[in-house]
Every structure is written in structure tokens, then in C-alpha cells.
Image (cartoon, rainbow, N blue to C red):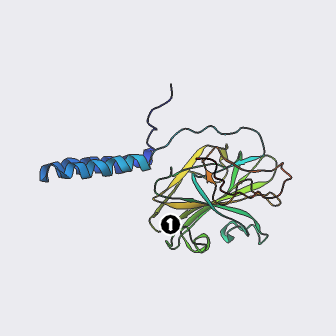
């Protein structure tokens, strides 16, 4: 039987615990303040929820590393700290608001071949300049087929902490958890050269489940539109 409530990521327990203790303290001040503390504790538990995901297992698929909305699909060089040259690649930018699941997942099977943390600013993660100027954590996964995918965790205006459990040389599988960002942020995915996105701007993605690209596919980049049916 499946869970009714998703588990809480262990990174969230210190926050949930601290708010629960604070709620008990508020009870000593005024009984009505208990409800404020209880609501904040419940919201914190909701933010750090960590549901299981079912990941497609076919080789050469690239899945979304984050829950959120595809904010932009553009061609851009990989961040310079990974020293991968200036050849533009298709970049999918996924924006996570404070209500999204913030646990990040590996986009493809392979080995972590590069990893670099870069300090920076905390502009709104929805801005284009956030990719270059904000605090970020960049890593490359090299697949068994020799192609590679780059992911960049980007801190935002509210998000001030990036967590990443990866290290160079680590073998990883698509859909595995690897970190999170607190509280509201963005993840950029740089696809292999010549590979186009199979998602559209405005589409909502689910980390570890939504296929954002297929290395075998020969079709051009996809478009998308909102279509309203009968109500």
C-alpha cells in the first residue's frame, strides 16, 4: 500500500524540529500563537516532502532533475567552471517555486566526471542573469555511451543553501536523489551536443519522471501551447 503522506527529506528534519519546539514555546505565551507555530511547522514539513518517483529505465533517456516549470529553452555554452569549451548546447531552465518538491534527481545513468561549486549573488532565479551570476553548483554526468549531461543547481532570491551529495568518480543512476536547494530556486540542464529538448516552455516537469530529452531521437525541438477544451 502506498504512503498517504510523503516522507520528509532528512535535510528538513532540523527545521521541522526547531519549529515544533518553537510552537511549544509559543503555547506558553498565548494559546492562539500555537496555531501560528503549527501552521509554520506543517508548511516546513510540506516543503521538505520527498516522494518516491518512478523513473523510465530505457538507455539514452534524460529525465528532469527538478520539479517545476520550464522557464526557458535556449542555446548556451556550459558554465566556464567545468572547462567544456564555448560550443552552445540546448539548455533547459526549470524554475522551482516554494511550493514545489525541492529534492533534485540525477538526469541519466553514468559517472560524475566533473563537479564545481561557485559562490555568487542571490538574484531572483527566474532572471536570465541568474545562470551566470548567482551562487551555483555545477556537475557533469558522463553516460556509458560517451555523451554527457550538465546540471547546474542555482540559488535564488530566497534560496540560500545548495546541498549536493555527489563527488567526482561516483557512479549514478537516473532518478536517484542527489541534493536539494532551499527555498525556491532553479536547475539548468545542458543537453549533449546535437540533442534537442522534448519539453516546451511553460510545461511542468516532475523530477526523475519527466523525459526532457532522448539521445536517440531525431525530431526537432518541440513546441507547446495551452489548449482549452469544453468546460
Residue 86 picture quarter: bottom right
Q: Position of residue 212 (x, y in %)?
A: 70, 51
- Res 88 → quadrant: bottom right
Which residue, as the protein is rendered here, is positioned at the far front? 230
* Residue occupying the far right of the picture: 218
Residue at screen point 51% across, 53% down: 180
The image position of residue 173, as x and y in percent, is 67, 42
Q: Which residue is under mark 1? A: 156
Q: Nearer the viewer, residue 40 or 16?
A: 40
Question: In the figure, 206 relative to 89: above or below?
Answer: above
Residue 226 appearing in the image: yes
Q: Is residue 18 visible?
A: no
Q: Position of residue 63 (x, y in %)?
A: 68, 48
Which secondary structure, mark 1?
Answer: loop
User: Looking at the image, which residue is at 49% across and 43% down?
Assistant: 50
Residue toward you, 118 or 71: 71
Taking the image as shown, residue 219 lies to the left or right of residue 42, namely: right
- Front residue of 7/5: it is 5
Horizontal side of 188 relative to 143 (left or right) equals left
Amino acid at each position: 500500500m502506498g504512503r498517504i503522506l510523503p516522507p520528509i527529506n532528512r535535510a528538513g528534519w532540523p527545521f521541522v524540529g526547531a519549529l515544533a519546539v518553537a510552537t511549544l514555546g509559543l503555547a506558553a505565551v498565548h494559546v492562539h500563537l500555537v496555531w501560528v507555530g503549527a501552521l509554520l511547522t506543517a508548511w516546513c514539513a510540506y516543503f521538505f516532502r520527498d516522494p518516491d518517483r518512478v523513473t523510465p529505465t530505457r538507455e539514452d533517456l534524460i529525465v528532469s532533475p527538478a520539479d517545476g516549470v520550464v522557464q526557458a529553452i535556449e542555446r548556451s555554452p556550459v558554465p566556464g567552471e567545468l572547462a567544456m569549451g564555448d560550443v552552445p548546447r540546448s539548455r533547459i531552465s526549470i524554475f522551482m517555486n516554494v511550493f514545489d518538491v525541492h529534492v533534485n534527481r540525477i538526469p541519466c545513468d553514468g559517472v560524475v566526471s566533473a563537479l564545481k561549486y561557485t559562490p555568487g549573488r542571490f538574484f531572483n532565479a527566474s532572471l536570465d542573469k541568474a545562470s551566470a551570476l548567482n551562487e551555483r553548483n555545477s556537475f557533469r554526468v558522463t553516460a556509458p555511451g560517451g555523451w554527457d549531461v550538465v546540471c547546474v543547481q542555482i540559488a535564488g532570491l530566497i534560496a540560500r543553501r545548495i546541498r549536493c551529495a555527489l563527488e567526482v568518480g561516483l557512479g549514478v543512476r537516473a532518478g536517484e536523489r542527489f541534493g536539494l536547494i532551499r527555498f525556491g530556486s532553479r536547475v539548468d540542464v545542458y543537453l549533449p551536443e546535437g540533442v534537442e529538448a522534448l519539453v516546451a516552455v511553460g510545461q511542468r516537469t516532475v523530477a526523475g519522471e519527466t523525459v526532457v530529452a532522448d539521445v536517440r531521437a531525431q525530431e526537432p525541438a518541440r513546441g507547446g501551447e495551452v489548449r482549452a477544451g469544453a468546460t
